[in-house]
C-alpha cells in the first residue's frame, strides 16, 4: 500500500490528463493521495476533487508565496474549508526565504495565524520550509505545533534538523530529491529516520524522482521514492510503503483507505 502524502493534482500541468494521472497512480499501487493547496482558490479546488474521489484527500492553507495576497478574512474562509469532508490538514504553510515572493514579515504573520487556527481546530499542519530553518523552528517552538502534530513536507535538511523537528512531534516526509545523486544529506536522513516518523510524497508535478528528473512528476512515482528509501534502509519496498502508509493514516486520520 502506497500513499502519496503531498501532491498538487490541481496544478495546470495536469489540466489535460488529470484522470489518467490518477488512474496510473492506482495502477502503481497508490491507495490514497493527499492533495495539497497553496491559496484559497486551490484549496476550494482540492476540496472538490476530494469530494469527487473518496481516495483523494485535501489540505487547505496559505503558502508563504501567497501570504501577501491573503484576503483579510482568509482565516474565516479556511475555517469553513477545513470543515469540509475529505479535508485532513491545514497546509501547506510555512516560510520560504529562497524566492521571497511575499515579504518575510508577512510570511511569518500568516504562518503564525495559521498555526493558531490549527491549534484551535486540532488539525495537523503541513509545513513548507525553504532556506528558513531557524525562523520556522523558532516559531514552532514559541507558538506550538498543536495537539494534532504535523509534517515537514519535502524535507531537504540535515539529520540534525530532522531531529529538531521530530522533537516537536512532527513527521518527516521524503520526496523525489532523495533519489538525486547530488542529494548529499538526504541519504543519511532516510537511513536514520525512526520508522514511526517517516512519510513518502511526490510533491508533483515538481521534483520528479530519478529516472524522470526534469520531467513532470506524478503520484505513481511515489513508488520510486519508496524504493530508494528502502534501499538506503536495507529493507523491502513493501515494508517501507506499509510503514509510511500507516504513519500517513495516523497523522492525517485517514479512514477507508484503498476503497472508492
Image (cartoon, rainbow, N blue to C red):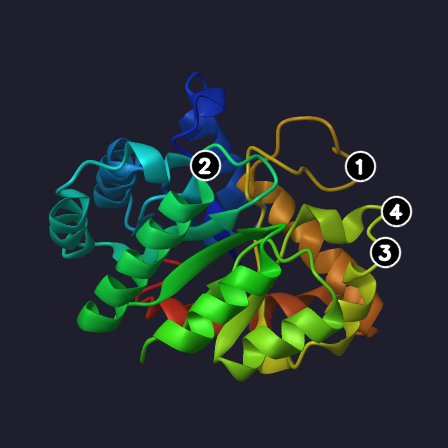
Viewer-side label of 3, 4: 3
Please give the name of the residue rendered at 57% of the width and 44% of the height, measured from the top-left corner.
97
Viewer-side label of 2, 4: 4
Tell me the number on the disc at residue 21: none
- Residue denoted by label 1: 211
Dot 3 lies on which element? loop
24 over 150 or under it: above or below: above
Q: For mark 4, does the 10 Å Cα neighbourhood hold few (<14), some (14 to 19), or many (20 or more) residues?
A: few
Judging depth in this view, the residue of 251 and 235 nearest the camera is 251
Viewer-side label of 2, 1: 1
Mark 1 or mark 4: which comes first in sequence? 4
Asked if labels 1 and 3 touch by Cβ distance under 8 angstroms, the answer is: no
- Residue denoted by label 4: 181
Viewer-side label of 1, 4: 4
Dot 1 lies on which element? loop
Q: Distance between the residues labelled 2 and 1?
A: 20 Å
Amino acid at each position: 500500500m502506497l500513499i502519496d502524502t503531498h501532491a498538487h493534482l490541481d496544478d495546470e500541468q495536469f489540466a489535460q490528463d488529470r484522470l489518467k494521472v490518477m488512474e496510473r497512480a492506482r495502477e502503481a499501487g497508490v491507495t490514497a493521495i493527499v492533495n495539497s493547496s497553496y491559496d484559497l482558490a486551490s484549496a476550494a479546488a482540492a476540496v472538490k476533487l476530494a469530494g469527487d474521489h473518496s481516495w483523494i484527500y485535501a489540505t487547505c492553507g496559505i503558502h508563504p508565496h501567497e501570504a501577501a495576497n491573503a484576503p483579510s478574512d482568509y482565516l474565516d474562509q479556511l475555517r469553513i474549508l477545513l470543515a469540509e469532508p475529505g479535508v485532513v490538514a491545514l497546509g501547506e504553510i510555512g516560510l520560504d526565504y529562497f524566492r521571497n515572493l511575499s515579504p518575510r514579515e508577512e510570511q511569518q504573520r500568516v504562518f503564525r495565524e495559521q498555526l493558531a487556527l490549527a491549534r484551535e481546530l486540532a488539525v495537523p499542519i503541513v509545513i513548507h520550509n525553504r532556506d528558513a530553518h531557524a525562523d520556522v523552528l523558532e516559531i514552532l517552538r514559541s507558538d506550538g505545533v498543536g495537539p494534532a502534530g504535523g509534517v515537514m513536507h519535502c524535507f531537504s535538511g540535515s539529520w540534525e534538523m530532522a531531529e529538531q523537528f521530530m522533537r516537536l512531534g512532527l513527521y518527516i516526509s521524503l520526496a523525489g530529491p532523495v533519489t538525486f545523486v547530488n542529494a548529499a544529506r538526504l541519504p543519511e536522513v532516510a537511513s536514520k529516520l525512526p520508522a514511526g516518523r517517516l512519510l513518502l510524497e511526490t510533491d508533483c508535478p515538481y521534483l520528479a524522482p530519478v529516472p524522470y528528473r526534469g520531467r513532470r512528476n506524478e503520484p505513481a512515482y511515489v513508488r520510486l521514492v519508496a524504493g530508494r528509501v528502502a534501499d538506503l534502509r536495507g529493507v523491502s519496498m513493501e515494508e517501507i510503503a506499509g510503514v509510511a502508509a500507516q504513519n500517513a493514516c495516523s497523522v492525517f486520520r485517514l479512514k477507508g483507505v484503498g476503497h472508492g
